[in-house]
Image (spheres, helix red, strand yellow):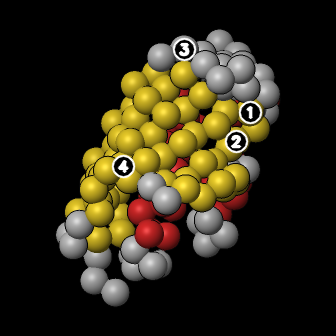
């Protein structure tokens, strides 16, 4: 996380490590809102990508990997508090890794569901 300044700029923070993934959070702040006053979709997409990617790279022992596909379904707006992402690694292969991510608001309501496929790179 510390090596990716964009994630730091957004204030993304790992809060827990599980045996199948991680949890991250992001505080909703005025500069992260869209014109409607809700969390910008790009912040949510970055949270999905980061939660999947940090989990995958960690579980690969730090071996490099890069996003090759990212899908996000936006299910409800979030306007205040924090958003919490929980990634689950569903496949960790030699060349590809795949994770699903649920993003919830401060009340535990699902605001987005996503997935990411990563290509595992040569060290």
Badge 1 vs badge 2, beta-carbon distance below 8 Å: yes
The residue beneath circle 4 is 99
65 to 102, vertically: above or below: below
The residue beneath circle 2 is 26
Q: State left or right for residue 32 relative to residue 102.
A: right
Question: Disc 4 or disc 3, which is closer to the eye?
Answer: 4
Asked which secondary structure carries label 4, the reply is strand
How crowded is the residue under tag 3: few (<14 C-alpha within 10 Å), some, or many (20+)?
few
Label 1 vs label 2: CA separation?
Answer: 5 Å
Asked which secondary structure carries label 1, the reply is strand
Badge 4 vs badge 2, beta-carbon distance below 8 Å: no
Q: Quadrant of the C terminus?
A: bottom left
How crowded is the residue under tag 4: few (<14 C-alpha within 10 Å), some, or many (20+)?
many
Q: Residue 82's mark?
A: 1
Label 4 vs label 3: CA separation?
Answer: 21 Å
- Across and down, in percent, residue 9 comes to 70, 53
Label 1 vs label 4: CA separation?
Answer: 22 Å
- Across and down, in percent, residue 96 comes to 23, 63
* Sequence-wise first label, 2 or 3: 2
The one of 9 and 26 positioned closer to us in this rendering: 26
**Which residue lies most toward the front here?**
19
47 to 117, vertically: above or below: above
* Sequence-wise first label, 1 or 3: 3
Residue at image x 60%, y 48%? 23
Asked which secondary structure carries label 3, the reply is loop
The residue beneath circle 3 is 76
The one of 67 and 31 positioned closer to us in this rendering: 67
- Across and down, in percent, residue 111 comes to 55, 22
In the rendered image, is residue 46 in sight?
no
């Amino acid at each position: 996380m510390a090596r990716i300044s964009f994630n730091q700029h957004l204030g993304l923070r790992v809060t827990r490590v599980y045996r199948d993934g991680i949890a991250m959070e992001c505080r909703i702040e005025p500069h992260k809102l869209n014109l409607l006053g809700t969390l910008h979709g790009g912040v949510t997409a970055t949270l999905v990508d980061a939660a999947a990617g940090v989990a995958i790279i960690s579980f690969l022992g730090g071996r490099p990997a890069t996003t090759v596909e990212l899908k996000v379904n936006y299910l409800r707006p979030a306007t205040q508090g924090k958003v919490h992402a929980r990634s689950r690694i569903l496949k960790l292969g030699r060349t590809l890794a795949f994770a699903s991510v649920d993003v919830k608001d401060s009340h535990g309501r699902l605001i987005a569901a996503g997935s990411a496929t990563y290509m595992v790179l040569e060290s």
